[in-house]
Image (spheres, rainbow, N blue to C red):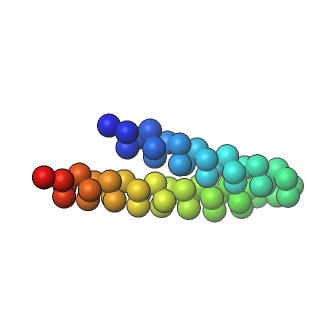
């Protein structure tokens, strides 16, 4: 199944983008990394829930 790979890509992208913003803004407490990683986890979980619902609704 594709679900773990999609979760990994979404979370990696969120952490990478947050880290990039922290380096660009010279933020010492990694605020953007924390925010975007948590946001990515919630998006990944939402994506998984939607995919599981679709799997259960297929005949």
- Depth check, front residue: 29 or 10: 10
Farthest-out residue, front: 59
Q: Residue at x 33, y 58 (%)?
A: 49
**As drawn, is 22 to the left or to the right of 44?**
right
Q: Which residue is drawn at 71% across and 60% down?
A: 32
Q: Where is residue 56 in the image (x, y as percent from the top left)?
A: 19, 55
- Give above or below for 43 relative to 6: below
- Depth check, front residue: 18 or 31: 18
**As drawn, is 15 to the left or to the right of 3?**
right
Q: Position of residue 51 (x, y in %)?
A: 32, 54
Q: How many labels does the image show?
A: 0
Q: Which residue is drawn at 73% across and 56% down?
A: 30
Q: Residue at x 61, y 47 (%)?
A: 13
Question: The N terminus lies in which quarter of the figure?
Answer: top left
Q: Is residue 28 visible?
A: no
**As drawn, is 52 to the left or to the right of 33?**
left
Q: Position of residue 40 (x, y in %)?
A: 54, 56
Q: Quadrant of residue 4?
A: top left
Q: Is residue 35 visible?
A: yes
């Amino acid at each position: 199944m594709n679900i773990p790979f999609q979760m990994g890509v979404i979370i990696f992208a969120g952490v990478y983008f947050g880290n990039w913003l922290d380096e660009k803004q010279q933020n010492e407490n990694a605020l953007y990394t924390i925010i975007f990683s948590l946001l990515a986890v919630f998006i990944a979980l939402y994506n998984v829930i939607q995919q599981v619902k679709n799997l259960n609704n297929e005949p």
